[in-house]
Every structure is written in C-alpha cells, then in structure tokens.
Image (tube, rainbow, N blue to C red):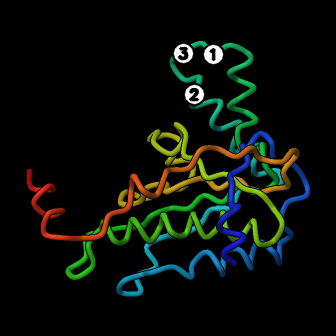
Amino acid sequence: MTDLLERRRSVLADKLTEPGPSAAETAQLLRCAVRVPDHGKLAPWRFVLLRGGARAEFGRAMESIASAGEELSENRRRIERERFCRAPLVVCVISRAAPHPKIPVWEQTLSAGAVCFNLLVGAGALGYSAQWLTEWCAYDADALRVLGIREHERVAGFVYIGTAAEPPTERPRPDLAEIVADWSPALAEAGAA
C-alpha cells in the first residue's frame, strides 16, 4: 500500500482516455471513497456522476453559461463543450458541510476533501489514473444550479478518472526537512512571534 501512495501522481484530465471504470468498479470506488474520517457520522458529502452522454450534455450547458453575456472564440466554445469529456468518468464530489452544534464546518469540509483523495488513490489501486480539479464551474452560480447544488453545498472537486494516455511525469515534492518539526516550547514561542 505504501508503494501505491509513494508513486501516486495525478494525470492531466486531457491525458485520460477509455477505458474508464465499469459500473461495478465505479460502485467500488465510491464505497472506498466514503471510508474517510467523518466526525459525527454526518456523511457531509454526496456525488454526482458525469459519464456516457451526460458528460457532453453537461458540457453543452457549461458552454452556454460561459458564453452568456460575452462572445467566445470557437476554440473556447469547444473547450467548454468538451471539458467534461476529457475522461470517461467525472465524479463531482459535493461538500454538504453545514453548521452543526458539535461538528465544526471545517471538519466536515476536510472530510469531503478526504473523499476526493480516496477517489484518486482508489482509481490508482484499480489501475486507472485520475485528476482532482475544480475550475470555474465549481464556483459559478449558474453552473452550480445546472449541477443541482443546493444552497449550503459546494463543489469539493471534479475527479476525472480514466486510463492514462501517457505516463505521468514526476514533479518536485517538498523536502521533509523544510516542512517537519518536532514540537518544543521554542516552536510555540516562534509561532507566537
């Protein structure tokens, strides 16, 4: 398992292709995705799947929204139309974090982020590749309405899943010596300064 995590790398959505996960594999991915810390057992997330023809239909809706009130080049129209067709499966993870008397919204939001990451790792475990994105569609009120987002919800991410058309390249990772510290009273004093 640590080998999988040590070599985990996102593949750009436009470098993902068929085949994508089968219906059974998608169900397995989603079952694994929800096995995250969830204080209070609130399940502060839900999923909207974009697959098959729904990807193109949703893309046409995003093209229409993007072009409302402004003239788009044909290239930009094509990009918006095809945005969700870049991978065979796009899982929209929706955070349902809401005020709760005991569970902070921040913890609920982190749980939704953990769901996104579990999808990335799960896709890799099944032999697929994935990328977690948000892009403008995650923040646009009209796009959110078309996606069926409710008032208290937010898009935690669009997780694109498919087969890598080419191997991912490695990128620099942080030097642990620069980001890890053992606690001491001096550390607390430095933080207060």
Residue 188, image quadrant: bottom left
Name the residue: 82% across, 53% down: 88
Give the spatial CA distance, label 1 vs label 3: 6 Å
Horizontal side, residue 59 vs residue 36: left or right: right
Q: Amino acid at mark 1?
A: Leu
Q: List the residue tagged with mark 2.
A: 66
Q: Is residue 106 above or below residue 10?
A: below
The answer to whether mark 1 and mark 2 are in CB contact below 8 A is yes
Q: Amino acid at mark 3?
A: Glu
Q: Secondary structure at mark 1?
A: loop
> Which is nearer the N-term, disc 1 or disc 2?
2
The answer to whether mark 2 and mark 3 are in CB contact below 8 A is yes
Q: Amino acid at mark 2?
A: Ala
> Number of numbered discs present?
3
Q: Mark 2 Cα within 10 Å, few/some/many (few <14, many 20+)?
A: many
Along the line of sight, the residue nearer the viewer: 98 or 58: 98
Q: Is residue 18 above or below residue 74?
A: below
Q: Secondary structure at mark 3?
A: loop
Q: Position of residue 152 (x, y in %)?
A: 36, 60
Name the residue: 49% across, 57% down: 156
Name the residue: 51% across, 61% down: 94
Give the spatial CA distance, label 2 vs label 3: 8 Å
Q: List the residue tagged with mark 3.
A: 70
